[in-house]
Image: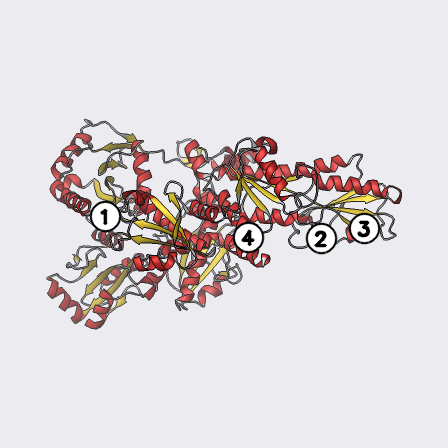
Amino acid sequence: MMWLRVAFLLLCTSAAGCTDTFNASGLLLEFTAVDFDDKINSGKMVFIYFESQVSQTVSLFLGELKKSADVLKDYGVLVGKINCKKERVPSYCTNEMVQQTAFLFRDGKEFLSFDLDTVFDVNSIVSEVLFAILRDEVKYVHSDADLLVMEKSVRGKKDIVLAYVSSLGTQEHRSVMETAYVYGSKHQFILITGGPVLKHLGSSPLSRVWFLHCAAPNSERCPLTPMRTPLSTLSLHAFLQLMEAPLLSEVYKDPAAVPSPLFPYRRTPQVFLFSHSETERLDRDTAEALAWRLRGVALMTLVHRKSPAVKTPVEYNAAYRLPDEGPEVRYLTLDNPDELLELFLHREGDEMQSEELEGEECNIEDDVSNGELEDEIVASVYLNRGHMVHTDSITQLTSDDFPDAVAQSGLTVVLFYLKWDAVSMAFLSSFTEVAQRLADAGVVDVHLSAVDCGEWTDLCAARPVGSRPISFQPITAFPSVLLLRPHEPIQVYRGMLGCEPLLRFILLSRPPSPRVLSTQQEVTSFLHGTPHPELAGYIPDKIVGLFRMRTLSDASVFNEAAKSLRGRVLSAMLTDVLAQEWAADLSVSLPAVLVFPSWKRHAPPTALSQFTSADELVSHVDAALLHPLPELTVENLPSLLSLGKALLLLFVGEEEDELGLRQNTLLLEEMKRLPESGGDRMEPYLTCWIHLGHTPAGMSVLGSYLGSLPPLPALILTHLPSGREVYEYPPNTPITAQSVLQWLQRVEDAKESPAGMLGNDDWPPSVEFYDFLKIMDEEEPGFAKQRVPQRDDDGEEEVDEAQSTAEEPTADSSYRTPHHSEL
């Protein structure tokens, strides 16, 4: 039974990264009043939140509660919420204080309540709920005297696992509680958060675990073994398994003939001491004493030389084997066993110090507040470094099979990545999830593949394979995703590095672009249908070209533009009679392009008739697709910034009632009138808005603009082409189109003072040792000199041949490498 629980714990831990992702898209169980009575009397623990008004805090909490539901389900805890606007549960939905509290029920009664300040994310929710469930099993001691009493109470019965966590509700706290849930019947768990107990154990600023050997009869105080690795569920599980290993093993053969440790000790070093017949008892005592001091670090074995099978030369009195060096055994001649102790404890200390340093670098909250490390991608990769990405659903391509794989598939989506690149490895997980979802949806004409550019540098450098050229330019940014079809130009994915955006892009790229429609029924299906069930609920932008004959030059321009927009916009073409009928109905002249924005579902399309090139038509289409007052989100921010206009950005809060909703609606209507009222004066500005309930990250953005959070609504002018200044519309002043125009005029006349400044666009390495180019310059000065542009006598820059070759324009002028560059 114990091993089943341990296996379950490890599976949950190793899948933790995926669990949060799936839960985030799932639905939180919403109970009715009848469900509430049934659930709390079902014999299970029930964790419930009574929702009355959704504020910013509550919205964030509900998102974390959603993630914790699947985790706690595996511990027998039901998680849900009750909407008090629909269901009036007595004494809970009528109390205003309840909206800041979550409740745990057991046996039909309220068992415990939690302020939302203490259950603020999935780690705190899981740890606090498990702590409540195990409150009788997990003890809490305040002083060394309390600890001594606990040791006496379990002596001869159980060992003690003593954990110190720097703060409750953290990942470390959760790890201790999850482990206590599995091992609680075998060991006595004690939790401390500081105080005098640490003086007895040795104080430490980081979370720590000690194992107190109390099960066997011993002296008044139980011997203790510290866990020397950073606290996590996996490391704590491995440590407890190591505590179950024999203190000392004895063999009668050479160390080289002793097999390496098996699971679960295969990652543990082995230490061998040699015993002589005349000093056997003394040697055993020495080995036992050393084994106690090396417990948790290495497995101790005593080799008896009295056996004829031991052939090791007598000048060696010790040996050891490291797990990462295979069966090799190293032999030593020591004057004192403490030399061996120093060797292993020093090695263990170096590894632990390295891991602690990495852990501190990846503590996002501390690093952002201290201004040291701000790379959240690196932090994510570090925290998930033990979770290997399963790539069974994608094909790993090489230089040998790449051309054939592309030629044999209608659409091949290829990810070019580097294993040592943080962004690549973070995106690889999303890429494999897309492949799995396509397979589950029965999409057989799309093949997802990956190329490790660290292994296949020739392929990523676009060198010809045999006599066959490569259809793309050298990959210089990672990760890069290309969509390849036989005998067609490549497509470059420039969207967000996430599962949903990439899946949407691929599915929108599958249909022909443009699709030729011959009947009115096909037109209706195109305009009102969806290209795939996976996109149900998503409304894509669409364009339709109207032409007299398909062979005209205008049609060829439209074809080229449609291919450029593929993946973002669905395109179709009408010709001859059908095109003339549509043109007559809409009172437009042929040729024309009709634009159907997703936000403009029940209005006539926008007609475009003046275009001479594909680039010009794409520009006109982008302008027609742009909402007159777009809502700024994380996903569309890059495309809005690419317009090169200053952002006139309105921040609105989440509506708590009908009055707040009506006020926000009126405010947005006023902002929509602003471009019309300003006319050409508003051309340099992009008027947009951000809803802090839909996009909680906007709260941090607003705070970074001004240094503090102003009252809402707040109108901000930022990303000016002329500078980094940020201007705030006067707070507590009515926002009307006319007053905003007057304020913009004062800004243009330099009569308004900036309220803040944008951060520098230069992103230097977060710490000194991340500046890889600087390190390369120091190690190979010649390479640094080669990278520095040289000037000739006329003052013009001379660029080396390799650089100019890499920067030659491609056959596909739209191909620009996406994301961040590693070169």
Q: Is residue 244 above or below residue 366?
A: below
Spatial CA span between label 4 and label 2? 28 Å
Tag in front: 3 or 1: 3
Q: Earlier in the sequence, mark 1 or mark 2?
A: 2
Q: Earlier in the sequence, mark 3 or mark 1?
A: 3
Q: Secondary structure at mark 2?
A: loop
Q: Which mark is residue 260?
A: 2
Amino acid type, label 4 = Val
Tag in front: 4 or 3: 4
Amino acid type, label 1 = Pro
Q: Nearer the viewer, residue 592 or 729?
A: 729
Tag in front: 1 or 2: 2
Q: Are marks 1 and 2 in contact (CB under 8 Å)?
A: no
Q: Are marks 1 and 4 in contact (CB under 8 Å)?
A: no
Name the residue tied to disc 1.
Answer: 630
Q: Which mark is residue 254?
A: 3
Q: Residues within 10 Å of mark 4 (few under 14, many from 20)?
A: many
Q: Earlier in the sequence, mark 4 or mark 2?
A: 4
